Image (spheres, helix red, strand yellow):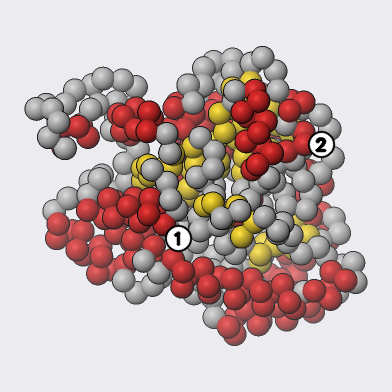
Amino acid sequence: MIRFNSAPLTGREAAYMQEAMANGKLCGDGPFTKKCSEWMKENFKVNQCFLTTSCTHALEMAAYLCDIQPGDEVIMPSYTFVSTADAFVLRGAKIVFVDIRPETMNIDERLIEDAITEKTKAIVVVHYAGVACAMDEIMAIAKKHALKVVEDAAQGVYAWYKGKALGTIGDFGCYSFHETKNYTMGEGGALLFDDMQYRERAEILREKGTDRSKFFRGQIDKYTWVDYGSSYLPSDLNAAYLYAQLEMAKEINDRRMAIYHYYDEHFENLEKEGAICRPFVPDYAVHNAHMYYLKLKDLDTRTAFIDYMKEKGVMAVFHYIPLHTSTAGKRFGRFHGEDVYTTRESERLVRLPMFYNLTDEQVQYVTEAVLSFQGF
């Protein structure tokens, strides 16, 4: 069976993890944690980067730093992972879902302003498949209405919008380094921001509500509990695994792009025949080949396709069930306007195997299996 995903291996991970063990500091903010943060600050041109235990926790930190209060409203797409909403629900917010653009599966920026009320506090964008949302328009809306913008860039590491790294455009950006992502530490994430006014609060929040970071820097002689916080620091062992991949970020990206382009070229005729839709990337975006998906005719066709691929020894999977249709989505949120595309497009989309260590022979086999499906 060709797996849908496998965590990347560069060959350096074990040596770096052994080095982390030899350092004698496996807890948070060890040498490799700092190396990862500095790498991202330098390569993504952002002032602050805090490595976290997950993108979920990075989003929770962002919700806190946005000062989300009970009763506030937060606008976001329904086509996203549950963590995007959960982080704000935990602060007592009401989630306002709006429809997506069918071509990118991203939030439709043209629908955001109509969803704004006097209770709206933030807009959360999700860069689906590492393809940027229309950030200029979204940032203009946020500025007009004095709203915060949080980028859920879980899938957007090493992807760009008009030359800017995803996660560095809004007030806060959140990355994922889960094992399903382009670069991984098993479980992990990062919070990015430019405005230095949030640095101290972010440090305290991440250090369980204490000022321990100041203590470690020698700025105070003892640390204490000073504010709300939680344990958001990853182990340095995890960071050591991640750093091996960040060092080879371009090589990993190039390999994924080669797989993406192979799929894309070989499925071009299927799209011309009207059997499928391939991924669409706007001119303003440089994606990171986080995934390769096809959109089929409808849900029944997708179900038949997944079953067929399984018979051929290939794992193909669908993605999110729209949040507004879930039990919790109905309890904690509401859909503003009409669901024209969110549900329809989510039922058509299927993802093909895509990971760094996928071999040329496996890519070719997957492609041939897709082309042999007779049910389009």
Q: Position of residue 270 (x, y in %)?
A: 84, 73
Q: Secondary structure at mark 2?
A: loop
Q: Single out the residue that lies furthest toward the left.
A: 221
In the displayed image of the protein, which residue is found farthest to the right?
Answer: 273
**Quarter of the picture holding the C terminus:** bottom right
Q: Nearer the viewer, residue 346 or 337?
A: 337
Point out the tag, 2 or 1, that comes first from the N-terminus: 1
Residue 317 location (% of width, % of height) = 66, 60
Q: Are marks 2 and 1 in contact (CB under 8 Å)?
A: no
Q: Find disc 1 in the rendering and name its residue.
A: 183
How packed mark 2 is, by other alpha carbons closer than 10 Å (few <14, some 14-19, many 20 or more), is some
Q: Quadrant of residue 195?
A: top left
Residue nearer the viewer, 88 or 120: 120
Q: Is residue 146 left or right of residue 12?
A: right
Q: Quadrant of residue 273?
A: bottom right
Question: Does residue 168 appear in the picture of this structure?
Answer: yes
Q: Which mark is residue 156?
A: none
From the image, tell me which residue sits under label 2. 339
Residue drawn at x 61%, y 60% as measured from the top left: 286
Residue type at mark 2 is: Asp
Position of residue 128 in the picture relative to residue 305 (left or right): left
Measure how far apart labels 2 and 1 are at the Cα level: 33 Å
On-image quarter of the N terminus: bottom right
User: Measured along the vertical axis of the image, is residue 324 above or below residue 272?
Assistant: above
Give SS at disc 1.
Answer: loop
Q: Where is residue 2 drawn, in percent x and y? A: 59, 74
Q: Amino acid at mark 1?
A: Tyr
Q: Which is more toward the observer, 222 or 322? A: 222
- Residue at 51 percent across and 68 percent down: it is 253
Q: Which residue is found at the position 61% from the left and 53% from the top?
A: 162
272 vs 340: above or below: below
Q: Quadrant of residue 364?
A: bottom right
